[in-house]
Amino acid sequence: MALLPIAFAIEAARAEEPAPPDSVSSRRDSFLPILGDEARKRGIELPLPLGAGLVYYHLDRDIEVSDVRVGRNGAPPTSVNQFAALAATSRVDNLNVKVDVWILPFVNVYAIVGYLWNKSDTRIDVTLPPLLPGGTPRRKTLDVPTEIEGSVGGLGLTLAGGYGPFFLTYDANFAQADLGFDDRFKAVVTSLRGGWNGAVCTRPLRAWLSVTDWNTFAEASGTVEDPDGGTLRFEVDQGPAFRYTYGIGSQYSWRPWFEFAVDTGTDFHGGWYLALIPVFRY
């Protein structure tokens, strides 16, 4: 599973002519960002300090199941890896509401809350004992599709800086999801972006390359009814088979109060993601 949507509130220092009149007139009097006046005196156009918008992303990737433990009727769960090998693919759709604020011209903090849908296909290769003593062990392969969904929330921080038309940002996001297991899934997603800051029709346009670390390794645990009677306790250690993705993206500020970003990337092993982020600023 993957969580956590990525922050796209990017603004780098860009030496240029004073901001267009519509940007100045639409900016509300505010003490945010702190040191904002000093930045504007140096010819740096800053975004409006507050933002509210949506974050939609789709993530498709392989999942590695490192261990499965099962216990029956209250017995401590023990590993069954010697009997079964598991491999899975995951498809996640996530929609979040995001609010953010520029505390400093180079520091943005944000919060997200939303919902996610996860569809997985798990292949189980099981080794069974022979039917007759001294016989050949039997092997079975099962394909198990599953669908789970639940709420997600998180907090994040973006640091931004630049030189001339170029910028660099670092983003860290902590999120957790409630998908119906005993414990919530927790994730830390960090990304580094570097790119170019320009303009189209006098409005800011940014393009970047990125690398993202999806630290979404987690244990899924719970208790289910045993078809033969009693209960089964399970614990599954799982995470992304390839935790790094490499992306390309762009953001355009059509008006001072509206930004739209698109970001896409791949892990070069069949996994990929797509994010769409419209944000209103005020």
Image (spheres, rainbow, N blue to C red):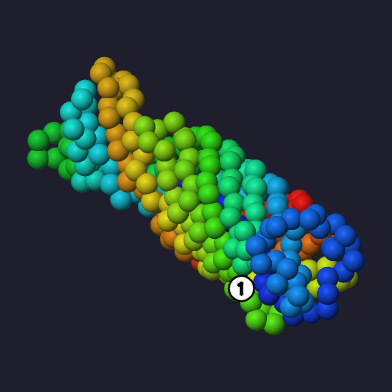
Residue 219 x %, y %: 34, 43
Which amino acid type corresponds to the residue marked 1 in the rendered image?
Gly
Instruction: Say how many tags the image has.
Output: 1
Disc 1: which residue: 161
Please determine whether, in this image, residue 146 is positioned above or below residue 12: above
Give me the residue at 19% from left, 38% from top.
78
Would you say 169 lies left or right of 49 here?
Answer: left
Would you say 261 lies left or right of 209 here?
Answer: right
* Disc 1 residue crowd, few under 14, some 14–19, many 20+, Cα 10 Å: some
Which quadrant of the structure image shows residue 73?
A: top left
Please determine whether, in this image, residue 46 is positioned above or below residue 15: above
Between 157 and 58, the residue placed more toward the observer is 157
Mark 1 element type? strand
Please determine whether, in this image, residue 154 is positioned above or below residue 32: above
Is residue 190 among what the camera can see?
Answer: yes
Is residue 141 among what the camera can see?
Answer: no
Please determine whether, in this image, residue 266 is positioned above or below residue 227: below
